[in-house]
Image: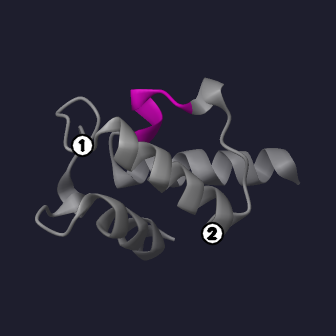
Amino acid sequence: MEEKILEIIRENAGTDTDWSVQTALIDDELIDSFDLVAIISDLSDEFDIEITVDEMIPENFNSVEAIENLIQRLQEEQE
């Protein structure tokens, strides 16, 4: 799952950054709002989840680990 998340981030936000070690993607403005919308759309499609507006908070998108935790939680809730 981590590799797919990294791939989606790279496709939408560029390859200049080592996304796997970042822990403040939103807080440090490494990902802007346009990137985030595209990333959320791709994550929703790839992992067959619905990311609601309530889930769109920095804590859920500041790192690859946070994104992975969000996806796992949403998948479990949808079962």
Magenta highlight range: 56-61
Please, what is the dominant secondary structure of the magenta stretch?
helix
Q: Are marks 2 and 1 in contact (CB under 8 Å)?
A: no
Residue 62 vs residue 11, the one in the foreground: 11
Q: Which mark is first along the chain, 1 or 2?
A: 1
At 57% across and 45% down in the image, what residue appears?
A: 70
Task: Confirm whether the magenta stretch covers residue 58.
Answer: yes
77 displayed left or right of 1: right
Q: Colour scheme in the image?
A: one colour
Foreground mark, 2 or 1? 2
- Residue 37 versus residue 49 in the image, above or below: above
- Tell me where residue 53 appears, x and y as whole percent: 63, 28
Q: Residues within 10 Å of mark 2 (few under 14, many from 20)?
A: few
Which labelled disc corresponds to residue 46?
Answer: 2
- Tell me where residue 46 appears, x and y as whole percent: 63, 69
Badge 2 amino acid:
Glu
Residue 63 vs residue 46, the one in the foreground: 46
* Residue highlighted by disc 1: 23
Could you say which quadrant of the image residue 27 lies in?
top left
Residue 21 vs residue 13, the one in the foreground: 13
